[in-house]
Image (spheres, coloured by chain):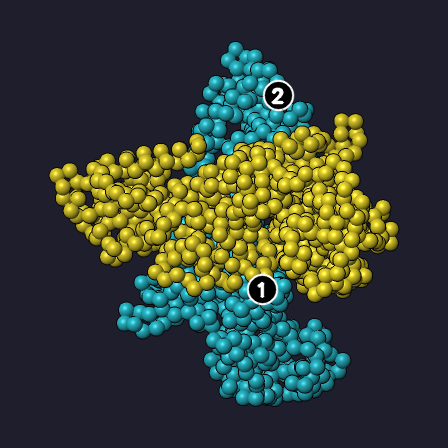
Chain colours: A yellow, B cyan
């Protein structure tokens, strides 16, 4: 990257208007500042100014990854489908994975991630425990065929990801690398000037155990975060837990009335039932029928489980049930968290069953499911239900409910679990504080994969005694484009971007009021002097009115602005005006000392950001 | 890139055996040295050592491109097919272009090149002549769906290309950038330590005028180069010309015998005819029927031309004849150069016509075509035929030939042109010297495109007077992977790679005989001292026999090897042994002065390569 540039020699097509489809600030400002242009829906080109900022993010990530001892490699972007078939993800990944047939009819994938590609490389080279741990990363193009790409590069189709993979002989070693990555990620985001919220996250389609997501707050975030007002607890709602808001009865009270069938004509929803019975939703046991796909959990002892078909998605992958149905009973005021439920079942997906399946499985019209008398299907009981000793629930028949239902007396569970969706107002499991919600965007993710890929792809090494083992694996990703866009989301004002110095395309912009004569000479001299000391400088040599140059400078957000004008040069001691972007006041600096002062300011700020 | 690394902390899986499918030296050595591994046929992953060398090539290219004033951008790798349909290349590119349908059924391309993508960006932003010239480049992933990928990264499917595009108001400006690119390319290859042969090249499917290819000599090269023994003439055989080896007769000699039909029973090939008539091939007028695709040349006045169908491959593209046939008459000892012929016809492709077409068009069996009496098809006469005043040619009937054929008297041409294939032994058009052939691989290509894309894609700018014009365009590519492999082809011996210092993954390798005690202390100290001065150093800290370390050091080709051993450290003045890779002799250097001496050697060599 050249460290000195004139505006007329580069290409920064700033815009006064806001692009019609740009909803969020970073999308608007990346277009208006001439950083980015659109090639097609979800496909963008970085122009010179944008690419400089992008490279700074890339360099910070590379430095921090190198510092963890991870080794950079460069696999291809297009990879053979065979690898994805081996891992079983050729089927599991769904339509978001871009699949290609080449001219010979062979299947390929435009990589959305690279667990398979990297694991296949490691498989071929790994023989001894002495080669482990091994941590490998790439910074490379990825593609996800988003059905509704939007918000500019925040949710594009093609993007650049830093993805790292580590292989280990034991849990302690995996944990060490996992923690080192967590520290590196914190430093990366801090060096980018980003406030991230590290949250414990569900693993989604990845499978595995420990994981942490690095989120930034965002109105348009894909994720709902659950945070505690009193302590540092932060979790993705997909995985969040809370303090129980119930007390399990020590035993059945002797006075408990017996189960009673009640007529509930024309009543189907919980709200209608509440009105009809003059009580509230917390008294109801809501029963939902779910269909789960590719269930890995053993169902052989579950109701109906012995009749279920099984298959192996790949030769080395564990057996799964391609389809299975479950009833979930939960307190009426709560929602079932489908991600928690999927994790519980080790299923690739769960969703409410179709009406026809509900009717078939409950032998009742939709709206009257209940756990009492329900057979042939595993019943999962949420913890909350175990504390209800006088519940109301559907009676598996039109217009009929049961009252005085008691778990354990009137029905049994196949499994008791926490499958509730935590929400604002629930209490923190750690400190009891009030939980609240935020929307967030995920910038990074670190994740212990365990044996998932090394088992399905048959990776092994020999230990000290010549015995063969599977290595453990971890995976660690950061989206570069999103990280860059998030920096703008966090650092801007009404006039434009306010770059943190570490990510700024240039550190200093010099604006000569009129680029001619003594002003031109001094501007050139100052630019040359700054360049020599490693300060990156943009010189606005355009023949434009000062107002236009000031507006553009604010828009593109270069941290230090130096205005060189006749008036200040005519002072007894010639001066230039220096202003920090984002601050109101400028100050005058002796022209002869300007380069040294700016160097000091820039270096000082860079060092401060590096040492925090 | 970290500038100091221990062998046990990185991943350099060297091999003693040669991979079975590795035919050429660079392929063998990139695998053996642990630079590269295969993911699938034609798809490779760079491992840490290979990526370091790759990045050095990338950095040299970026520096030289920046120095020309070209601006780096980053478009996507996957681009919408619409752009390729606009330019007409969606059809013209054939099967080597990897096409993808996304989940919504829309067509995309995994970019093989980016004239369309970049031109569409420029189209949207260009308004005034003041924005021109504009030169833009990217260094990015490309894909060509090679049907037979081989020779490692020399002919892979996915690769990285530096591709630049420039836009201009006039020829002089285009020429200036074209020449600056030519100079930059020479510097790039020189800095990589490569001997390139710049040759004038045909434009292939690109269309346009001036172009230059940068070739390296290679046994397995795709290209045949025609070179002069006496002067600097160098051309791709696809475009090469030569000094005429004939003299056109000033006028028909009065004594010329009249055309005569002769019986030639059972005679079909030129060889048979030579034997039958007891003469040589130079006396024959060979007549070949060609089928041409997408002919842009105006054929309205050519024989049969008025009946030909026309179409526009894209709304703004020029009209073409999707299919047209031509007869080519050439001296019997020569071959027709199909690339020259295609360029002459402005056709996307030409090939010999099918037998059935030959029979239909000549109204004669295959093997008896000739220009005399041939009608309804344009006859292209090679220059050589105009000088033949007593030729033999097919008579458009089974077992019949004409003798004493004279061009101009017995038949006419639609066009006279140079369509011969030049070969070794022909004479240089510049100096008359003897021409010879070499096989070459193309590393780079610079090319004046003219208006081809700016016209078909409707790009315009307003001049000083507000009048709209098309800009002229140039395109400039370099393949990074090929360039790197070519460095190894040129710099190696039986033991391994001998890196030029500019491309070497590390400048210095330190080999402690045994990594312990005083030897370890000195090796560490030396590595730290070198790192501080910017010298990149690899320290072989493995617990291996010295022989293994020496063999690996030779294989991976680090330019300077420093051996640290007990014996030399025990000298009155402790010493280490320094050896330049590729040289036989080592020399002893005082341990205390080793870092400074190596810094001097490394910097000296780097500066020398930069200044050549």
Q: Mark 1 lies on which chain?
A: B
Q: Mark 2 lies on which chain?
A: B
Q: Report x, y in % for residue B242.
A: 51, 65
Q: Mark number for residue B108?
A: 1
Which residue lies most toward the left here?
A572
Which residue lies most toward the front here?
A255
Q: In which quarter of the image is residue A533?
A: top left
**Drawn side of residue B187 relative to residue B487, left or right:** left
Which residue is more in the foreground, B324 or B393? B324
Residue at left 32%, top 34%? A600
Residue B554 visible: no
Q: Is residue B188 above or below residue B589?
A: below
**Figure label count:** 2
Marks 2 and 1, how far apart at CA: 55 Å
Q: Report x, y in % for residue A112.
A: 62, 52
Which residue is more in the foreground, A413 or A520? A413
Q: Mark number for residue A608?
A: none
**Would you name the residue on which mark 2 appears?**
B515
Residue at left 72%, top 78%? B268
């Amino acid at each position: 990257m050249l460290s000195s540039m004139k505006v007329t020699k580069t290409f920064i097509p700033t815009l006064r208007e806001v692009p019609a489809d740009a909803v969020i600030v970073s999308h608007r400002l990346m277009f208006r500042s001439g950083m980015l242009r659109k090639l097609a829906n979800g496909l963008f080109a970085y122009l010179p100014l944008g690419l400089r900022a992008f490279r700074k993010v890339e360099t910070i990530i590379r430095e921090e990854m190198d510092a963890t001892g991870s080794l950079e490699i460069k696999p291809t972007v297009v990879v053979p489908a065979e690898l994805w078939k081996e891992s079983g993800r050729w089927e599991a990944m769904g339509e978001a994975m871009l699949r290609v047939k080449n001219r010979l009819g062979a299947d390929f994938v435009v990589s959305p991630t690279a667990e398979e590609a990297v694991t296949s490389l490691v498989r071929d080279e790994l023989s001894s425990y002495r080669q482990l741990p091994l941590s490998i990363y790439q910074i490379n193009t990825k593609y996800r065929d988003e059905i509704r790409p939007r918000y500019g590069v925040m949710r594009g189709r093609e993007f650049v990801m830093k993805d790292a993979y580590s292989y280990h002989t034991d849990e302690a070693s995996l944990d060490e690398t996992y923690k080192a990555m967590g520290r590196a990620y914190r430093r990366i985001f801090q060096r980018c000037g980003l406030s991230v919220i590290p949250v414990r996250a569900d693993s989604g389609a990845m499978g595995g155990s420990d994981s942490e997501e690095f989120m930034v707050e965002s109105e348009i975030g894909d994720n709902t975060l659950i945070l505690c007002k009193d302590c540092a607890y932060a979790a993705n709602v997909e995985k969040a837990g809370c303090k129980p808001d119930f007390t399990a009865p020590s035993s059945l009270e002797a006075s408990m009335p017996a189960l009673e069938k009640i007529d509930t004509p024309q009543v189907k929803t919980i709200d209608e039932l509440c009105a009809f019975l003059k009580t509230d939703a917390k008294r109801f046991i809501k029963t939902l029928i779910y269909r789960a796909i590719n269930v890995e959990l053993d169902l052989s002892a579950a109701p109906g489980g012995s009749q279920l078909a099984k298959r192996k998605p790949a030769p080395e992958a564990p057996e799964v049930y391609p389809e299975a149905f479950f009833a979930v009973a939960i307190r009426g005021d709560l929602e079932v968290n489908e991600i928690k439920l999927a994790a519980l079942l080790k299923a690739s997906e769960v969703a409410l069953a179709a009406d026809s399946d509900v009717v078939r499985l409950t032998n009742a019209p939709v709206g009257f499911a209940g756990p009492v008398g329900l057979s042939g299907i595993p019943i999962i009981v949420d913890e909350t239900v175990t504390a209800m000793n006088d519940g109301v629930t559907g009676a598996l028949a039109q217009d009929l409910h049961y009252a005085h239902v008691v778990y354990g007396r009137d029905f049994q569970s196949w499994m008791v679990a926490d499958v509730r969706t935590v929400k604002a107002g629930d209490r923190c499991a750690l400190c009891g504080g009030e939980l609240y919600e935020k929307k967030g965007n995920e910038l990074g993710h670190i994740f212990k994969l365990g044996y998932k890929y090394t088992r399905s792809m048959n990776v092994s090494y020999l230990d000290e005694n010549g015995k063969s083992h599977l290595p453990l694996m971890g995976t660690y990703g950061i989206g570069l484009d999103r990280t860059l866009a998030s920096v703008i989301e966090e650092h801007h004002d009404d006039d434009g971007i306010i770059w943190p110095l570490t990510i700024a395309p240039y550190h200093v912009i010099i604006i000569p009021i009129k680029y001619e004569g003594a002003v031109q000479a001094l501007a050139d001299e100052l630019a040359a002097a700054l360049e020599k000391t490693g300060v990156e400088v943009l010189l606005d040599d355009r023949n434009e009115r000062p107002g236009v140059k000031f507006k553009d400078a604010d828009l593109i957000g270069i941290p230090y602005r130096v205005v060189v004008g006749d008036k200040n040069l005519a002072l007894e001691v010639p001066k230039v005006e220096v202003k920090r972007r984002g601050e109101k006041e400028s100050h005058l600096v002796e022209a002869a000392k300007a380069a040294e002062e700016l160097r000091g300011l820039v270096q000082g700020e860079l060092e401060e950001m590096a040492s925090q």
